[in-house]
Image (spheres, rainbow, N blue to C red):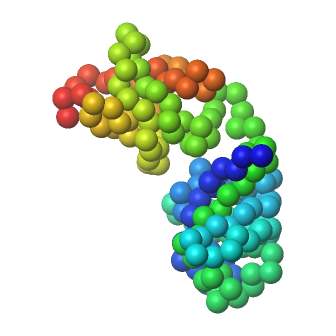
Amino acid sequence: MSSVRIGRLGRTHGVQGEVNLDGTSLTPLELHAIKRFVWRCAGAAERVLTLVAARPALTRMLVRFEGITVCEQAAELTNGELWAAREALPDPGSGTAYTFQLVGLRVETEEGRVLGVIAEVISTGAHPVYAVRGARELLVPGAPGVVKRVDLEAGLMVVALPAGLEAL
């Protein structure tokens, strides 16, 4: 059973055990569907955490776990990562993929020219931006019209680069 990194726990929020969950692409409903997570942090023993609350807060998610009811307990989770069994993730739906599924995809133009590999997915207000590393790094917008096809099985994303993007 393989596991997937869900996000990193940041600073605490308030006094009732909430903590910031940074870097997740999941919604509160998707987090609740998973419910059980493994917390990992360098130099500490893994812990199994059961989610009791998740809510959006600006660019982050605030989460609270069973048995974590005060700020001091939540602070112990800071800088740890949340992991979940890949099988526990809800189906993202037709034509949709999780961020972790995109990282590592080979990116090619419609003409078949290899641009590199997606190294990172950067969240923005409108569309994600894919940091594609090859002969040089390109920041490719994940907008309709740019992303032509994603084939997770083949490990491939086909794009139509906007005019002038490679000149930047």
23 is higher (above) or lower (below) than 165: below
- The residue drawn where x is 43% and y is 26% is 107
Q: Tell whether 95 sits left or right of 139.
A: right
Q: Quadrant of residue 154?
A: top right
78 is higher (above) or lower (below) than 93: below
Q: Nearer the viewer, residue 71 or 36?
A: 36
- The residue drawn where x is 49% and y is 24% is 157
Q: Quadrant of residue 87?
A: top right
Q: How many marks?
A: 0
Regarding residue 20, the answer to whether it shows in the image is no
132 is higher (above) or lower (below) than 159: below
Q: Position of residue 95 (x, y in %)?
A: 64, 27
Q: Position of residue 12 (x, y in %)?
A: 58, 80
Regarding residue 45, the answer to whether it shows in the image is yes
Q: Position of residue 112 (x, y in %)?
A: 40, 12
Q: Nearer the viewer, residue 42 or 87?
A: 42
- The residue drawn where x is 35% and y is 16% is 113
91 is higher (above) or lower (below) than 156: below
Q: Position of residue 110 (x, y in %)?
A: 41, 13
Toward the left, the furthest residue is 167
- The residue drawn where x is 58% and y is 43% is 100
Q: Quadrant of residue 135?
A: top left
Q: Nearer the viewer, residue 152 or 55?
A: 152
Q: Quadrant of the C terminus?
A: top left
Q: Tell whether 40 sits left or right of 103.
A: right
